[in-house]
Amino acid sequence: MNKTQTQISKLISYWLRHKPEDGNIVLDEFGWGSIEDILAALKANNIESTQRDLIELSNSFDKVRWKIDEVNNKIKATHGHSIPILQELEPQTPPEILYHGTATKFLESILGSGLKSKQRQYVHLSETMAMAKEVGARHGKPFIIEVDTKKLIKEGWKFYKTEQNVWLTSEIPPQYLDVEP
Ligand code: HQG
């Protein structure tokens, strides 16, 4: 993916996850928007693109970020939302341990107030330590927190699996986190 492609994909993800109104895009309650609207919003930014281009762009990512419905010509972000969307997915039983990748500089605060979703609707968890490490490295020196999902499910937490091993859940208080700084 060249730089321009990266910029285009970030712009689309920004509309789909955070600010659809900036692109005059209307998302439904599940976060779906019409591809036509996205293409029009790109055009308003002097970017000529087609549905096929969007599919190719999506397929070029290092991980799944968008879901494209080619029958109904719709697109949605699979995760990362700050705008509230309803989950179409049923909650699923995750592996007994999931991992949250963060940065060492956040540890003290996480130990005090737990894992917060911050700007996002959900806390994001990974199935593998390797992926959690990558997620954490976006913020600084990575640190991986193990999350005991079995215990949380007993206490009523729900876990949603997005397309590619990204799990979404609600905020987690510190007593449920296995953190040894
Ligand atoms: C941290 C990317 C202080 C949290 C990724 C994280 C993911 C706290 C940061 C997805 C805290 C928020 C989401 C507390 C949590 N005090 N810091 N109490 N609780 N934090 O970017 O999970 O590549 O909003 O640990 O791969 O890093 O864009 O969340 O470090 O799947 O598709 O606050 O975004 O996906 O950062 O990333 P973020 P995240 P894409």
Image (cartoon, helix red, strand yellow):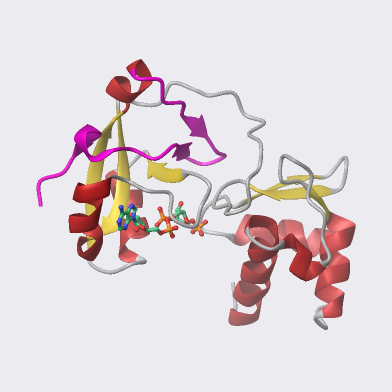
Q: Is residue 163 above or below residue 151?
A: below
**Residue 35, how many percent across, how many down?**
84, 56
Q: Nearer the viewer, residue 160 or 175?
A: 175
Residue reaching furthest left? 180
Q: Is residue 157 above or below residue 130?
A: above
Q: Quadrant of the N terminus?
A: bottom right
Q: Nearer the viewer, residue 171 or 127?
A: 171
Residue reaching furthest top? 154
Q: Is residue 71 above or below residue 97?
A: below
Q: Is residue 36 visible?
A: yes
For image coordinates 20% across by 56% down, the residue present is 107
**Residue 43, how many percent across, how many down?**
86, 76
For image coordinates 59% across by 23% down, the residue present is 90
* Residue 172 lies in the magenta-colored region: yes
**Residue 32, how many percent across, how many down?**
76, 46
- Residue 141, quarter of picture: bottom left
Q: Is residue 124 left or right of residue 104?
A: right
Total of numbered circles in the picture?
0
- Residue 24, quarter of picture: bottom right
Q: Is residue 123 left or right of residue 91?
A: left
Q: Nearer the viewer, residue 17 or 39?
A: 17
**Residue 14, how many percent across, how many down?**
64, 65
Task: Assign ligand 1 to one image quadrant.
Answer: bottom left
- Residue 106, quarter of picture: bottom left
Magenta segment: 155-181
For image coordinates 85% across by 66% down, the residue present is 39
* Residue 106 lies in the magenta-colored region: no
Q: Is residue 123 left or right of residue 9?
A: left
Q: Is residue 153 above or below residue 144?
A: above
Q: Is residue 49 visible?
A: no
For image coordinates 80% across by 80% down, the residue present is 45
